[in-house]
Image (tube, rainbow, N blue to C red):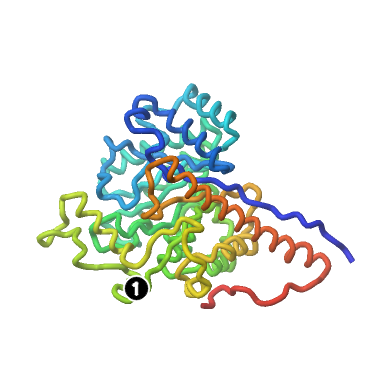
Amino acid sequence: MSTRKFEPKFMRIGVLTAALQELTPRDVRDKDPDRAIEEWLDFARELQVDCIQLSAALHPSQADVPPEAMLDPVANTLDLRKPFDRPRARRVESAMKNTGVELSDIAYFDNMLHHDPALRKKKHDFMMRTFEAASLLGVNAICGFVGRNQEHSMDQNLIDFEEHFIPLLKAAKERGLTFRVEQCPMPGWTTGDNFHNNIGYTPGTWIALHRICEKHGVGDQFRIHYDPSHAILMGQDTRSIFQYLKDEGYGFLIGGFHVKGQVIDAKGVAAWGYGGQTLNRGDWIGGKPSEKPADQLNAWKKQLVLCEHELPGTARHDPLAYLQNRTVDWLDHQLAARELLPLDVAKTHLIVEHEYPRARIQDRERLKPVLQGSIAFTRRIDEAAACMYALQHEVLAAQDIPIQGIGRQAYRS
């Protein structure tokens, strides 16, 4: 009888720097942009993470969406008003060496299919600067959205993707980069009635988009940065999504993870369903979209009336909610990833993304223990899943000892 060592493999734990946008005050980092990265790396060391996901965004003075209209404030920890060059890269690399904290990837979340050609070019130009920064820093991936042309149907957006997004992937390929799409549908991104404003929102569309990529020789550049909170928002569960991808032969698409939950409000679902609030939101005034950014924020009631983001570990343990897909079953999430996806686990990043509204504290010392607790929870959950997987699927399997019980099953609620 053969035996196998017990050798659990753990994922790399990190945090998205948008968790604390004002770590370095605006008046300081505007004058000395890379100080924001240095101070975040130092903060990350205190949080005891392996890496950070570096948030990039158009500077508030250049953005087309006012901060008052945003559900989750955007962090431009990586300031690209001026191109990122070799001296800047050396400064960041020195800070990484001093802190022992790595970069997992760079995150820039924007609408790459915007219907306005001038705005679309502005966003694409910024994305190219992000590519250049990633190349100089030795980072091999960018995380972001595809977006949506609001003037076109979803089928027409496939044509838009081919025309406008494929060139970005070709540029990424030239630099040895991968683009990982986070699947948030971005329902409140517009005052219109569209719920799905990022067309890369679900496995069916990932596969359709990847087939277009393959046709143009950039299939290896298109991957998914999976976030379970968005699955919960759409009534899905992680195990079923991963099983579907495996069944269809596309399990390889998952290239990284955001660790962010969603807690469904059953009363909100009773009132509005999973499509969210469709009228009387306050983003339309006098029969037309309000011009006031603060009013436009109400477009997010398409999401907010039925759920709230969870910072991992802050929601009560609720087995019934797990079974109803009304919050994330974190342990099964990590087990399913190992059981159903062809991952190199030791090189896979779990990035904590903090968007729990009532804990969005812009104070380093107050937020620090909150993030420390969530990060510790995330690490222990992954360690538990790793141990279960190694014991059941490697140690027991090597000795032909069956796994006990049934466990959570895909496509079953």
Q: In the rendering, at what x and y percent does residue 316 appear?
A: 48, 65
Q: In the rendering, at what x and y percent does residue 250 appear?
A: 56, 61
10 to 238, vertically: above or below: above
User: Is residue 268 toward the left or the right of residue 253 in the image?
Assistant: left
User: Is residue 92 toward the left or the right of residue 380 in the image?
Assistant: left
- Seen from the viewer's position, the closer of residues 369 and 411 is 369
The quarter of the picture where residue 128 lies is top left
400 to 79, vertically: above or below: below
Q: Callout 1: 10 Å neighbours few (<14), some, many (20+)?
A: some
Give the residue at x 36% y 47%: 110
Q: Secondary structure at mark 1?
A: helix
- Seen from the viewer's position, the closer of residues 260 and 338 is 260
Could you tell me the amino acid type at mark 1?
Answer: Val
Q: In the rendering, at what x and y percent does residue 379 appear?
A: 60, 52
Q: How many marks?
A: 1
Residue 210 in sight from this viewpoint: no
- Seen from the viewer's position, the closer of residues 256 and 116 is 256
User: Is residue 127 toward the left or the right of residue 119 in the image?
Assistant: right
Dot 1 corresponds to which residue? 269
321 to 173, vertically: above or below: below
Give the residue at x 34% y 61%: 196
User: Is residue 126 toward the left or the right of residue 289 in the image?
Assistant: right
- Seen from the viewer's position, the closer of residues 25 and 152 is 25
Give the residue at x 63% y 47%: 347
The quarter of the picture where residue 299 lies is bottom left
Q: In the rendering, at what x and y percent does residue 289 appear?
A: 16, 56
